[in-house]
Image (cartoon, rainbow, N blue to C red):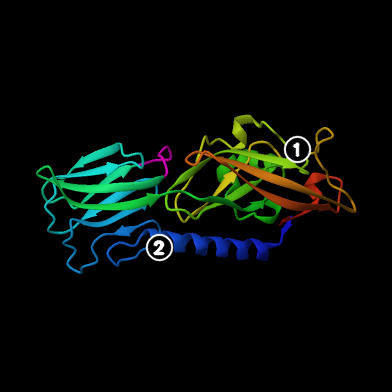
Amino acid sequence: MTHDHSQFDRRTVLRTTAGLSLAGIAGCLNGSESSGGTTSTNGDSDDQGALRQVAVEGTTLVVRLGSESDVEQINLIQPNGELFGTREVATGVQQVSFEIGTAYDPGDYRVIAVQSGETVSETKLEIRPQLEIVDVGLFRNNPDKPWDEVYGESETNRRKDSEAFVSIHNSGTGPDAAISLRFLGDVPNPAENPRNEGTYEADTVVIPASETRDVYSNSLPFSAQTGDEGMGCSVNMDTGKFSTHIETRVSGNEISENFEIKYSGSVAMTDCEIKISVI
């Protein structure tokens, strides 16, 4: 299989740059700016501010305190105004964290530092994912992917020409998770309701903010053609269109992308040349 990578790369760079720019804007406070969903609340070199830095790292919200901060408690308030959680701050502790996972409500979160029952510092951080499909690939053109690790070495030879991966980029400021994968249209074996939600041995695939993750299929979308719905290989060339669909956990939305596909060179899937390009 071959890919037209130039269009993928250009669009991915443009989208990623735009996402990081928005994250930088959201991270501005008191004249300090940072990317990746991080909010700096004290840019002083001595780091003495009560809330020195608030950042989402993976699926965790990390709160770093100033070196001379006098804080007893950190409260995290959800976008709906309800308390997400509280962390007691022992003497000498300069960092606390909240595990937000991939079941949180996206929106603006408030971090409040408390001493003797009074608020001594407060900041706000938007935590919101933004997923997009940036690539689809097969083993024949991507042998460097960890196919043996994903499917098991004994299964790879049977599956490598039938399964596929989908790359998902998160240009937002919070983590999300892919919970289903479907291939529809002119693939040999489309599946509206695939087994295990179409993802291989993984209920969810977490995609942290500003990162890209691969989701591997479990529905054999590129196996031999079954029924009349799919499109198979051709000695000359068959051209069609297919779409990939990912259901997301945090946003609760389905994201999708459309691709053009060309089959040529053989009637057998194992010997067929496949070219995929974004529409």
Q: What is the x, y in percent for residue 8?
A: 64, 61
Of the residues shown, which amino acid type is indicated by label 1? Asn
Q: Are marks 2 and 1 in contact (CB under 8 Å)?
A: no
Q: Which disc, if any, is residue 189?
A: 1
As for residue 53 lying within the magenta part, the answer is: no
Regarding residue 152, the answer to whether it shows in the image is no
The magenta segment: 100-106
Query: Outermost residue, bottom direction?
Result: 45
User: Which quadrant would the N terminus be assigned to in this image?
Assistant: bottom right
The quadrant of the rendering that contains the C terminus is bottom right
Q: Would residue 208 be found to the left or right of residue 183 on screen?
A: left
Asked whether 235 or 40 is in front, the reply is 40
Label 2 to label 1: alpha-carbon separation = 43 Å
Badge 1: residue crowd in 10 Å (few <14, some 14–19, many ≥20): many
Q: Residue at x 61, y 66 (%)?
A: 10
> Residue, x 60% and y 42% (percent of image)?
246
Per the image, the residue denoted by label 2 is: 24
In percent of width and height, residue 268 lies at 83, 45
Q: Quadrant of residue 68?
A: bottom left
Res 4 → quadrant: bottom right
Q: Which mark, residue 240?
A: none
Q: Position of residue 261 (x, y in %)?
A: 77, 52
- Amino acid type of the residue that numbered disc 2 sits on in the rendered structure: Gly
Q: Secondary structure at mark 1?
A: loop
Does label 2 or label 1 sit earlier along the sequence?
A: 2
